[in-house]
Amino acid sequence: MLVAAALCPCPPLLVPEIAAGAAPELASARAACAEAVGALAASRPDRLVVVGPGRSGVLETYPAGTRGSFRGFGVELEVRLGEGPEAGGGRTLPYGLAVGAWLLARVDRCASPVEGVAVGQETPGARCRAAGRELRESSDRVAMLVLGDGSACRTLKAPGYLDARAEPFDADVARALAAADTGALGALDEELARTLRVSGRGPWQVLAGAAEGASLGGALLYEGAPYGVGYLVASWS
């Protein structure tokens, strides 16, 4: 059963070593993520699943101990998913799960078994929701750290340029996260999300499946678009 969830954006710029001089611009988002992940750890799950954007159109799992690296962003910084011996069969975490591992490493109360699930952008919503339902049945107390960004088309200088549909899309997601509305998340327009370069669509829909019938309450902790990309932080419990 799903008992809690933390929803965070996953730009590598959340990591201060990568952001360098721009680190203060995401200070509020970083603090909100720390609050959400802290609440997640306090829920005392017996299984913690980190869900984030993947590299392909399929769902991929990563065991505890899988390493991630931020070398591709110009920083000699490595992370590991949870505790325990190195694992992963030589695979490394995709960037979203690496950000999730970094967030978890900053919380000293999280001793639950951890695993990762990466969701490719082309993964259908129905498959995402089904995966969420499977995950919630895997243990008595499941918690999820869900990583993903909103639209990358909020301003002229955004990665996807300006699209008038971007801000309303992100506003709808923000309302759904604040209300823990699984129906609204499950019904997100997949084609529009792809056009707006929304990396969180798949992970959010995995959460939608996992949280069906769980009667969780939601709180929106942060909403902004400092680089023309929608960043949202929420806590469900």
Image: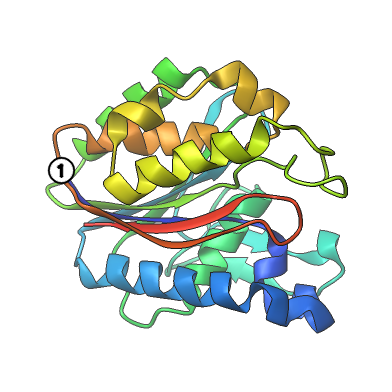
User: Whole-percent x and y of residue 133?
Assistant: 26, 29
Residue 224's place in the image compared with 192, above or below, is: below
Left/right placement of residue 208 relative to residue 11 reads: left
User: Whole-percent x and y of residue 218?
Assistant: 27, 53
Left/right placement of residue 186 relative to residue 91 reads: left
**Quadrant where the N terminus is found in the figure:** top left
User: Whole-percent x and y of residue 222?
Assistant: 48, 63
Colouring style: rainbow
- Residue at (73, 44) in percent of width and height: 154
- Residue at (55, 21) in percent of width and height: 123
Q: Is residue 132 visible?
A: no
Dot 1 lies on which element?
loop
- Residue at (48, 66) in percent of width and height: 85
Q: Residues within 10 Å of mark 1 (few under 14, many from 20)?
A: many
Please name whichever residue, 211 or 89, is drawn nearer the observer in this view of the structure.
Answer: 211
Q: Identify which amino acid the numbered label 1 is placed on.
A: Met
Q: Where is residue 22, by image quadrant?
A: bottom right
User: Whole-percent x and y of residue 8?
Assistant: 49, 57
Q: How many marks?
A: 1
- Residue at (39, 57) in percent of width and height: 234
Q: Is residue 148 visible?
A: yes
Please name whichever residue, 219 or 107, is drawn nearer the observer in this view of the structure.
Answer: 219
Q: Where is residue 47, by image quadrant?
A: bottom left
**Quadrant where the C terminus is found in the figure:** bottom left
- Residue at which label 1 appears: 1
Residue 53's place in the image compared with 44, above or below, is: above
Left/right placement of residue 78 relative to residue 101 reads: right
Please name whichever residue, 170 or 60, is drawn nearer the observer in this view of the structure.
Answer: 170
Please name whichever residue, 126 or 187, is drawn nearer the observer in this view of the structure.
Answer: 187
